[in-house]
């Protein structure tokens, strides 16, 4: 309203100065809110990795007893690799690049000419490909390990069990005790896995919902003001909404990586 009202003055410079004042104010408010949400996302992802560092030794010890040492060691190494990727790639690379992308989107609409749109698109494409590649690689490793490693451990355990059962006199008792012990350890393993999966979802749920609501509100505001506002203002608000959408994807992907790993290990056969 202020920028449009200033357009009635004969001197066009007054209108331009008014617009830039309004845009810089909007730029500052939007960017400050986005920085706060990015910090919250980083804190939640750090909490998630810290939880996985605590869960890993306990959970995969139960996996070693229930499934076998090969399955436990392989998936534990995968979880450690995931923690390393999240701390190195997502927290130290992708999140800063999301901030850079958002700043470029806002600066691009400061002028009526788009000078930074291609650079912003390039960064968006890089972030998008990085997320998809990370998800595809981890899911592929999980599926391959989930199909092969439990079979290897099952064969090894079957040989040991049959050898023990072949001992005259005590073979049947050993076989029965083995079945009871394995059944108990599988139950413990599944309980720990389900609890860990629920906690992972809980850690990611709060920032995911917060970012989703804010992203929707920015998109809604951009749609409402488009008929009456300067298109650069609309582009600014729409651009900050795109930044929140990238944050949303990062939270979802990170939570999904750990959740899939836990679920696949929990569902693996013994």
Image (tube, grey):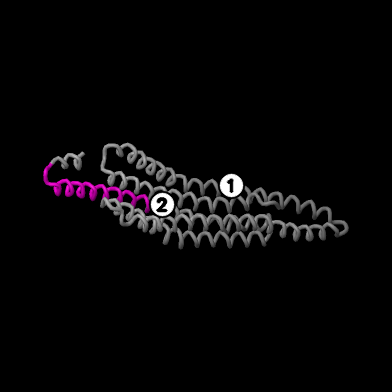
Image vertical order of residue 130 relative to residue 17, above or below: below
Image quadrant where one finds the N terminus: top left
Label 2 – label 1 distance at C-alpha: 24 Å
Q: Residues within 10 Å of mark 1 (few under 14, many from 20)?
A: some
Q: Residues within 10 Å of mark 2 (few under 14, many from 20)?
A: many
Give the image quarter of residue 119. bottom left
Q: Position of residue 179 (x, y in %)?
A: 75, 51
Give the main secondary structure of the magenta stretch.
helix
Labels 2 and 1 touching (C-beta < 8 A): no
Magenta residue span: 9-38
Q: Can you identify the residue that label 1 sits on?
A: 194
Q: Position of residue 252 (x, y in %)?
A: 48, 49
Between residues 76 and 148, which one lies in front from this camera angle? 148
SS under mark 2: helix
| Residue occupying the point 81% across, 53% down | 173
First reached walking from the N terminus: tag 2 or tag 1: 2
Residue 219, labelled with which disc?
A: none
Q: Can you identify the residue that label 2 sits on?
A: 41
Between residues 167 and 234, which one lies in front from this camera angle? 234
Question: How many marks are shown on the rendered structure?
Answer: 2
Between residues 218 and 62, which one lies in front from this camera angle? 218
| Residue occupying the point 32% across, 48% down | 33
């Amino acid at each position: 309203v202020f920028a449009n009202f200033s357009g009635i003055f004969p001197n066009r410079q007054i209108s331009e100065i008014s617009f830039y004042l309004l845009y810089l104010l909007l730029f500052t408010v939007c960017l400050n809110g986005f920085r706060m949400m990015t910090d919250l996302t980083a804190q939640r992802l750090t909490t998630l990795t810290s939880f996985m560092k605590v869960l890993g030794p306990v959970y995969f010890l139960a996996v070693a007893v229930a499934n076998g040492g090969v399955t436990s060691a392989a998936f534990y190494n995968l979880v450690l690799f995931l923690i390393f990727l999240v701390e190195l790639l997502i927290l130290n690379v992708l999140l800063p690049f999301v901030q850079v992308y958002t700043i470029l989107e806002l600066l691009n609409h400061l002028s009526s000419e788009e000078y930074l749109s291609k650079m912003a698109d390039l960064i968006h494409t890089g972030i998008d490909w990085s997320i998809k590649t990370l998800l595809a690689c981890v899911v592929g490793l999980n599926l391959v390990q989930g199909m092969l490693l439990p079979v290897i451990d099952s064969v090894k355990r079957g040989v040991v069990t049959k050898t023990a059962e072949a001992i005259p006199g005590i073979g049947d008792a050993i076989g029965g005790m083995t079945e009871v012990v394995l059944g108990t350890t599988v139950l413990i393993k599944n309980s720990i896995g389900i609890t860990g999966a629920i906690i992972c979802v809980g850690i990611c749920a709060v920032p995911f919902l917060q970012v989703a609501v804010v992203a929707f509100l920015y998109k809604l505001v951009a749609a409402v003001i488009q008929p009456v506002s300067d298109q650069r203002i609309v582009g600014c608000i729409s651009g900050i909404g795109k930044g929140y959408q990238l944050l949303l994807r990062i939270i979802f992907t990170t939570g999904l990586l750990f959740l899939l790993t836990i679920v696949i290990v929990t569902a693996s056969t013994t």
